[in-house]
Image: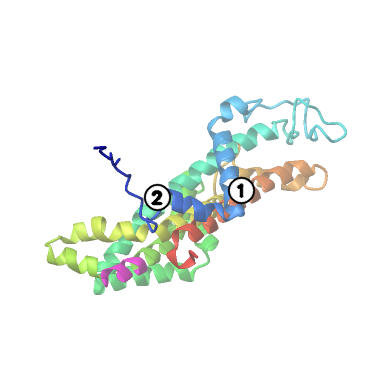
Amino acid sequence: MAVEIIEPRAEPQPAGAPPHPVREFWNYFSENKGAVGGLIVIVLIALAAIFADVLAPFPPDQQNREALLVPPFWVEGGSLRYILGTDDVGRDILSRLLYGARLSMLIGCIVVTLSLACGIVLGLIAGFFRGMIGIAIMRAMDIMLAFPALLLAIVIVAILGPSLTNAIVAVAIVVLPHYVRLTRAAAVNELSKDYVTASRLAGAGMFRLMVVTVLPNCMAPLIVQATLGFSSAILDAAALGFIGLGAQPPTPEWGTMLADAQRFIRRAWWVVTFPGLAILITVLSFNLLGDGLRDALDPKLKR
């Protein structure tokens, strides 16, 4: 008698299995072509900042008195030795832009890290303690928001003294209220949900509720705000440098470069144009990236 051999079948995957979170995020993020373009530009700027020592043809402060206000190489009178031209004291503009990218990215990282960390702490405290402590924190943030951001930064730097470090501190203080308000709003929204109540009943302490239970579910809007705040930090630092309250010459910072070059705007357009374009492209790229992150991380915007 023949025996029929039945081979085991592989169990089919359920049709409604959720995709991997990283793949799902990338699917939503990649639909925004502007955000992908912004991410590519930011990566290129970051690489240029990291490898500025290798890419820059000259040291940022090296002067050549025989090459004052040399135009870019494609303009009559330009030279391939100075691709983007030189400034009024013979410094290579391309080299200063590359080192300026390093400084601007560093400013953005420090400002976002400081303001985000302090904003999360104050926001969680204001969200969990809604009595006098929470009211005092939020009213202080409201007072700070009542001032124009740049004006408040100017006042802080004027009190502390003009320097790059004080400019970073001032910008971090100026953007702090946005993180505090956003963290508090997200925390208050999460506190009304069942999983927080279950954690309380399970005996979770206040610190565990803040850091382990609630904070991870508040990070999506904070990541978006941090990305947008990166561009604001670069822009505000450049503005302070432009009016002489940020990085001081001869530091290769984009705002300081604009301030030094404004008197040559008619006779040497390249001295002003390239630092301005660097600020414009960087800030625009971070804004586009922030929009893409918002679309990918906000469940309300997912189709």
Number of marks in picture: 2
Q: In the shown orientation, is residue 140 left or right of residue 201? A: right
The image position of residue 280, as x and y in percent, is 65, 51
Q: In the shown orientation, is residue 72 left or right of residue 18? A: right
Q: Nearer the viewer, residue 4 or 69?
A: 4
Q: Residue 220's quadrant in the figure?
A: bottom left
Q: Which mark is residue 291?
A: none
Q: Residue at x 49, y 53 (%)?
A: 227
From this viewpoint, is residue 121 visible? no
- Is residue 63 in the magenta section? no
The image position of residue 302, as x and y in percent, is 48, 64
Residue assigned mark 1 = 37
Q: Earlier in the sequence, mark 1 or mark 2?
A: 2
Q: Residue at x 61, y 35 (%)?
A: 98
**What's drawn in magenta, residue-wise?**
185-193
The secondary structure type at the circle numbered 2 is loop
- Residue extending farthest to the right is 76
The image position of residue 1, as x and y in percent, is 24, 37
Q: In the shown orientation, is residue 55 left or right of residue 292? A: right
Q: Marks 1 and 2, Cα distance to the nearest angstrom?
A: 24 Å
The image position of residue 106, as x and y in percent, is 49, 41
Q: CB atoms at circles 1 and 2 under 8 Å apart?
A: no
The secondary structure type at the circle numbered 1 is helix
Mark 1: give few (<14), some (14-19) or many (20+) Cα within 10 Å.
Answer: some
Residue assigned mark 2 = 20
Q: Nearer the viewer, residue 172 or 261?
A: 172
Looking at the rendered image, the disc whose residue lies closer to the viewer, 1 or 2, is 2
